[in-house]
Amino acid sequence: MIVTKNLKNAKSKEPSILTLGTFDGVHKGHEKIIKRLINESKKSNLKSLILTFFPHPRNVINSNSEVKSISTLEEKTEIFSKLGVQELIIQDFDKSFSNIRAEEFIELLVNNLNLKKIIVGYNHKFGKNRSADINSLKNYGSKYSFEVIEIEAFEIEDIKISSTKIRNSIESGEIHKCNSFLGYNFNIKGKVVKGKSIGKAIGFPTANIVLDEDYKIIPKNGVYLIKSIIENEKLYGMMNIGFNPTFGINKKTTEVNFFNYDKDLYGIILKVELIKFIRDEIKFSDVKELQYQLKSDRENCIDYINSTYNN
């Protein structure tokens, strides 16, 4: 898949079919639209294009509220590529771009992308202040000679998924619900760095992760059952997100304890898939009470793995 930064650099000689949006999380609803794009592309012999925006448009239009992203640009790019998209255009979304008039935007698409078809949802809005809708788009289609394929309400709403619902489920620790919406396990990724070795001292050595992108949403504090692939080996473990209140640490950390694995992970980039929320973060009265709880957490995780994956 070709990745192009900004519409001005996208010059397609081949006639194309396009869909566009933020696609945060690339969830099941998004996947349905993208598969339709790929099918139409093959059927009509058109180049399949996705236009997405970064940063999240809501963060630019309304600077008083910050929307954390479900997926990073790298993650979205990987999913688009796996789905078979031929070219991804990542448009810098700034104040200037947000002020482009609807017809000016359409002219950019037609002139730069050799646009023949565009696929959008029934409620698609575009242009300055989101002033243009699906009917406007169809009028522009007639004027500029491209076909508008509208994804009807029933085709999307039967799934009842939205990026907002997914963000809410992540922030509330409802990881199982989040994963069912996404169609894959929500994950975080970062570099393993040296910590204070507290986990190792109490019999639960941890990999301390510094997360890659600060614009990505982080789940609520607590303990999670997780999975990683390290050197082609599938490993399960438990992860704590929080402040280690038992030890009075003020800095928020993300720490992973893998079951039956004790190799040195310092310096590697670790991807962690979240499977299940286990419990909230707790301040214990002493280290022994914490150790007892961690053993119980581990047993709960292993029981879940055995009952879910080994039957």
Image (tube, rainbow, N blue to C red):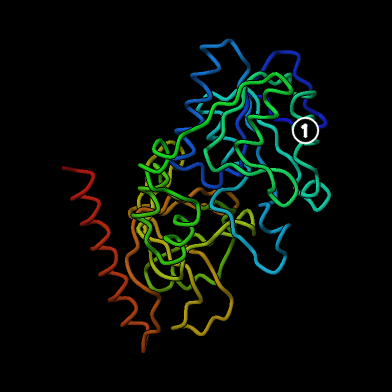
Can you say whether 235 is above or below 254 in the image? Answer: above
Q: Quadrant of residue 88?
A: top right
* Residue 221 in the image, given as x and y percentages of width and height: 45, 71
Closer to us: 82 or 308: 82
Q: Which residue is mark 1?
A: 7
In percent of width and height, residue 161 lies at: 42, 48
Q: Position of residue 240 (x, y in %)?
A: 43, 67
Quadrant occupied by the N terminus: top right
176 vs 138, left or right, is left
In which quadrant of the rendered view does residue 66 lie? bottom right
Q: In the displayed structure, would residue 36 be above or below residue 196?
A: above
How packed mark 1 is, by other alpha carbons closer than 10 Å (few <14, some 14-19, many 20 or more), is: some
**Image point 69% across, 59% down: which residue?**
59
Q: Is residue 119 left or right of residue 7?
A: left
Image check: 61 left or right of 268? right
Q: Quadrant of residue 280?
A: bottom left
148 displayed left or right of 144:
left
Q: Is residue 136 above or below residue 249?
A: above
Which residue is located at x 69 percent, y 14 percent?
Answer: 15
Q: Position of residue 294 (x, y in %)?
A: 32, 71
Q: Helix or strand or loop: what does disc 1 sit on?
A: helix
Looking at this view, name the residue that lies furthest to the left.
311
Q: Please identify the residue farthest to the bottom as the structure is shown.
A: 285
Total marks shown come to 1
Q: Amino acid at mark 1?
A: Leu
